[in-house]
Image: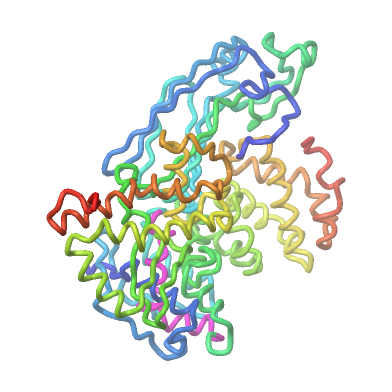
Amino acid sequence: MNINNISFPYPVLGINGDVLPEPTCEVVKGDDKESFFFNIKLTQENETINKLIAEDYADIFCEIDCPSSYFRQCWSGKDTSFSVTIPKKSVRAKIWLLIGIVVKKRIDDYQNDGFHEDYKGFSFVMEPGDLLGVFGQYDFDADIKYDKLQAVNTFMEIRENKEDEETRYDLTNDKIRIYLPTQLFTQYQRFAKSGFSDIIHSSIVYNAMLHALCNWNEIDTSSGSYPLWARTIWYRLKTEEEFKEFGITDEIPIQDVYRIVQKLLKDPYKRMFDNICDLQGTDSILTDD
Amino acid sequence: MELQKIFRSSYASQLRDDVKQNIGIERWHGESFPFDESKLLVMSDVNHPDGLLEKMDARNDMESAIALYEAYPNLTPFIATYAPFWESLAHMDLFEYVRNRWPKAKESESKYVLDHWFLSSGVGRHALANLWWTVRMSLQEEESNPYELTRVYFNISAEIRTRRLLVSSLGRNRNSTIGILKFYRDYKELLFDNAGTYKLMYIMKYFNMLGGVKMLCYLPSSFFYNELEKIIDRIDIVKGRSDVQGRDDLFADLEI
């Protein structure tokens, strides 16, 4: 269930202040080699709803949905603190968690002292499956290597173009692919292993990244299944402090793309000149004369 | 027992690219597929079944599906939706079956190969993944006839099973699938008629709308069965696409 933009035919705790007091929800994510863990702590002080839960008319639930792997589970119980474990072998790409309170047994005359005054005096028939409350909806991406976000090889790769003599970019796979003509690819393989990686980053990789971000509008970020390189970049743009100045919401501002790419690649020009200096055995190639 | 071998993901991806660019497409027209043995991986936790190809019958989807599922009964959701796994089976172990089941590769666009040999269009279109998932979602292990509902599922037109129900949010929910299939089992005359496709479209739309305000994932399969019994008269009314798309009265009491 996606609760965005839904108007319910009855007041729902956690939606538009329909029912007070407002609940809170704290979700702490962790993982080990085998599983993802979610430690969930809810605060819910509406007495009517707490009574319905205690008398088994309602349950707290957590729906876990991973459309890409068909994994779908619904945890339910009475505790406001609980943990959900998801085996890593069961999921990939985007995973959605919806946490709320659901009607378990029919309630003929649902009234609540916490109703917003618009609903005061009304009562509702609630059937099993109806939502009484929503604590929140959370998502995370099981594929993103959160511990290797900065590594270029997590979102880009260079391959051989066997078909013609052009350099091409392909944005449709898990990594941005740069196809180099055979001769260049052979040279690249030799140089990549010889300490030229910063120079490669500032040239081939920089250009490919610029191309990718300039074509960002071709990617549908509203679905959970767009290419992994884009999900990784998008996660960085939305969460890392240094990108906040760009005010990125749904799109990447085209006028800032070159600055964003420089930040994503950690100042590639500086690294290139440092690399050249290292290779020349000098401190700086910029001299007064 | 021998372990299952599959393509390295980079090799599977290269083959996919080849089809997209029409490179070496004749490889999919032959008796067997000339794959590169140096590009294989051994799976550590999936056994290679013996004699599966002989049990697969291109003229009988249900029997093939059961044979395939029984050969790989414990796939994790990750593996069962992992493109290189299904793509490897379709090109190596079961190439002959896939070629016989989907025999028009030679005269069709490359999309035909992408759809049935690769997971490009999802599990519903893939020659093997659609069979395995149909069994997975309809199997009742605790029943004396665990495949009773699988048989019902395969009686629904392949088009609507693979392109709509199996790949929908409703179809990914085992309880809803079981409830709907039990209803199909008990009301054959109502559902398996000329308007069967539209009736299922109506049922899916009805539950999708209901899912807007109800936690369908929380509800047991009996809920779905009972809900369908409640709207049996409306299902009977549905005769065509316009009833599904244009008759608001058929969804009137959903209050959404």
Task: Tell me if A259 is positioned left or right of B194 in this view.
Answer: left
**Residues rendered magenta in the picture:** B78-104
Residue B235: where, in percent of width, then height?
A: 79, 53
| Quadrant location, the N terminus of chain B | bottom left
Q: Is residue A289 positioned above or below A10 on the image? A: below
- For the point 64% across and 13% down, the residue is A20
Name the residue at the left extreme: A281
- At 21% from the left and 67% from the top, the residue drawn is A191
- Direction front: furthest residue: A289
Q: How many marks?
A: 0
Could you tell me which residue is drawn at 48 percent across and 67 percent down? B119
x and y percentages locating residue A26 in the rendered image: 45, 23
- In this view, A238 is above or below B6: above
Q: Is residue B185 magenta?
A: no
Left or right: where does residue A266 sit relative to residue A105? left
Tell me the quarter of the picture where residue A56 sits: top right
Seen from the viewer's position, the closer of residues B54 and B141 is B54
* Relative image position of residue B18 (x, y in whole percent): 44, 79
Measured as percent of width and height from the top left, residue B29 is found at 47, 89
Vertical position of residue B208 compared to residue B198: above or below: above
Q: Of B237 and B81, which appears nearest the observer? A: B81
The answer to whether residue B149 is visible is yes
Asked where in the image residue A106 lies, by quadrant, the reply is top right
Residue B101 highlighted magenta (yes or no) = yes
**Visible residue check, residue A79:** no
Colouring scheme, one of rainbow, by chain, secondary structure, one colour: rainbow
